Image (spheres, rainbow, N blue to C red):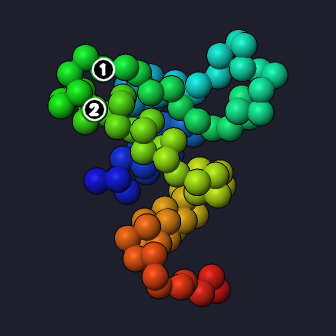
Amino acid sequence: MRFKTAVLMYKATRGTATLYLSQLVRVADLPGRRSLRSARTNRLLVPSVKLTTVGGRAFPVAGPTIWNSLPDNVISAPSPSTFRQRMKTFLFQASFPDIIIDPR
C-alpha cells in the first residue's frame, strides 16, 4: 500500500500522473516560507480531515503523509526506476532494521 501510494505521489509531483491526481497534490510552498530552509524541500501540504477514521485513508491525505515521511534521497530520485529502487530499499530497511544491505 505504501509503495504504490508513494509511486503515485512521485508521478503526481513530477507531472506524469493523470490530471485529477496531480490537482490533489499541493506543495507546501507558502509565500512566507520562501526565506526558510524548509521552503527548499519537496514536502507536501497535508489537508486537515473531519473524520479521522475514513478521511486519513483518502488519497489527498494519505499520499502527502507517506511522501513527507520519506527521506530526501528517496524523494529526490531522478527517474521513476531509481525512485522505485530507493523506495524498496527504504521499506526493506524499515521492516528489517537488523539486516545490513551492501549498496553495490
Residue at 30% x, 20% y: name it.
Answer: 49
- In the image, residue 83 sits, relative to residue 22, either above or below, namely below
Q: Position of residue 15 (x, y in %)?
A: 54, 35
Q: Is 59 in front, or is 11?
A: 59
Q: Position of residue 21 (x, y in %)?
A: 39, 30
Mark carried by residue 56: 2
Note whether 51 is above or below 100 in the view shown: above
Q: Residues within 10 Å of mark 1 (few under 14, many from 20)?
A: few
Of pointers 2 and 1, the one earlier in the residue sequence: 1
Q: Position of residue 61 (x, y in %)?
A: 36, 30
Q: Nearer the viewer, residue 32 or 7?
A: 32
Instruction: Report crowding for label 2: few under 14, some 14 to 19, many 20 or more residues within 10 A (C-alpha).
Output: some
Residue at 53% from the left image edge and 31% from the top image edge: 44
Q: Quadrant of residue 64?
A: top left
Position of residue 40 relative to residue 74, above or below, is above
Q: Is residue 16 visible?
A: no
Q: Residue furthest top?
A: 31
Q: Amino acid at mark 1?
A: Val
Q: Which residue is mark 1?
A: 49
Residue 49 appears in view: yes
Comparing 33 with 58, the one in front is 33
Report the side of 52 relative to 69 (left or right): left
Seen at 37% across and 70% down, the residue is 95
Q: Are marks 2 and 1 in contact (CB under 8 Å)?
A: yes
Residue extending farthest front: 98
- Out of 43 and 19, give the one closest to the viewer: 43
Image side of residue 59 versus residue 36, left or right: left
**Amino acid type assigned to the residue bearing label 2 in the image:** Gly
Q: Quadrant of residue 78?
A: bottom right
